[in-house]
Image (cartoon, rainbow, N blue to C red):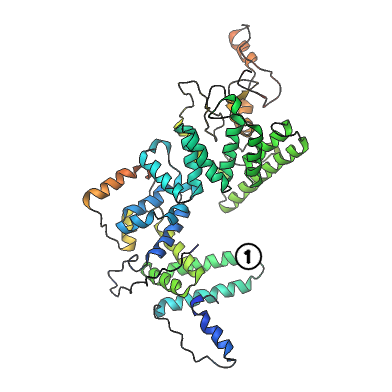
Amino acid sequence: MKFCAVKQYFDDENNNNITSGASTTMIPLPNVESHPLAILITYCKKHLKIKANNADNKKETEKEMEQYEQELLKKVMPQELTELILAANYLNFKEALDFFCRAVASAIQNKSIEFVRKFFGLESDFELGEEEKLREEFAWSFEGVDED
Amino acid sequence: MRKKQKTTPPPPYSTNAEESDLFDGLPDDLVVFILCKVSSSASSPSDLISILFTCKRLNRLGVHPLVLSKASPKALAIRAKNWSESAHRFLRLCVNSGNIEASYTLGMIRFYCLQNRGSGASLMAKAAIKTHAPALYSLAVIQFNGSGGSKNDKNLKAGVALCARAAYLGHVDALRELGHCLQDGYGVRQNVAEGRRLLVQANTRELASVLRARSVSPDPGLNGSGCGLLSDFGCDVTEPETHPVNIFLKEWFGSGCDGSGLRMCSHVGCGRPETRPHEFRRCSVCGAVNYCSRGCQALDWKLRHKVECMPMERWLEENNGGDNGGVGGGDGGGGGGEEEGELN
């Protein structure tokens, strides 16, 4: 059960001996919108399918998973990433959370400050002198920053 | 390790699509989680530091102990020419957050560059206790040479013990060093067969790591000057990657000639300086190069010294036409001979 947050609902069902038909229990997910949920469900299904296909070969699983993840990333907009991360976090879906956070991390890696600000829609809330002071202080780290 | 969600519920989604502020919607612990990934995969300090400049919130979260503790070795790869109090402070922050790479890096810098032996050694010990292989090896070298103290401070047994622990973790230089110690009976009972076995193991590990790196990025153009010892077996592989702190040491001590007559280890990948005159051993054939350890000597021999090493006597004869033959010419026996630089 990948969606750990809803695990409890399924355990209850087994105890109530429901073997046929769909369950009638409503599972409330107040903090998850339909779009990210759909993506997460697809991700989960794909993950399980690939695992089943390559039961013995771990490397194959990883490779296929990576390919799928690359394609997925191309379709997802940066704005959706936040929603996906929050949804995965709420559902306690560790692999998806890990994957999306890695995606965000690699997007902002080694990019200029302006790029990072633009990517996340941030505004600098530093006062005039503060930013200059910071730049001077950390001048030692700047070498070879990607200008986008 | 993902932090559990704190008691603060995530703020509601911003419904205004134009003002999509990605980070606003994310609670602090998720941002820290993302920043941890940035720091652990950073390939240079600027990767992480530039995040600190974007806004106050990221400035605060970027120096969260969890983020700093995951910083990769490359994220801490400061260049010697950029060294400053601020860089020092940053490294100290990382050390305090429990980052053992930072402990090792700052330890080496304090010990060799800033001449603060006590603090440097204790920082390296901190990393060594957490089984950081390079720290164990560096401490072993210090014990073998009695660095930071006098000739009588050498502790061969301690050096061998530390080397053994680093070798157990698979550190190639330590394996080599231990192999030589066993072959020569240096600090440990002589066991030539075991020594030989360790040397072979070191070579195979090196080959394995190079091949692994090759399979990730297949670039035949990387064959520069072939790697040291494996050229024995006809393998032309590239040199192993040097640790950023060795590059730092190398740059710090410049060309290697200090005014006070202290020399540097002649192996290019090492960068360690002497801490007292005549601390390092020199090549007994030509006497022109010095090494901090057998491991460095063996590597440098195969890398470049083999071709340029020539007995001093012959060199002087050729140039002076029959003068009195030369000072300290040494034994002229095979390759890689060595003798203690210090006169007993």
Say above or below: B222 vs B251: below
Say above or below: A62 vs A132: below
Q: Position of residue B165 (x, y in %)?
A: 64, 44
Residue B243 visible in rendering: no
Quadrant of the image occupied by residue A11: bottom right
Local secondary structure at mark 1: helix
Question: Left of B43 or right of it: where is B207?
Answer: right
Residue B22 visible in rendering: yes
Question: Left of A40 or right of it: where is B62?
Answer: left
Q: Tag 1: Cα neighbours inside 10 Å, few (<14), some, or many (≥20)?
A: few
Query: Type of residue at label 1?
Result: Lys
Q: Position of residue B210 (x, y in %)?
A: 61, 46
Out of B27 and B72, give the one closest to the viewer.
B27
Q: Position of residue B188 (x, y in %)?
A: 71, 34
Q: Position of residue A66 (x, y in %)?
A: 53, 65
Residue linked to disc 1: A58
Say above or below: A143 vs B115: below
Q: Residue at x 39, y 62 (%)?
A: B31
Q: Residue at x 62, y 74 (%)?
A: A52
Out of A104 and B124, give the one closest to the viewer.
B124
Q: Residue at x 33, y 63 (%)?
A: A120
User: Chain letter of disc 1?
Assistant: A
Q: Residue at x 53, y 66 (%)?
A: A67
Work out which quarter of the rendered image holds the C terminus of chain B and state it: top right
Quadrant of the image occupied by residue A104: bottom left
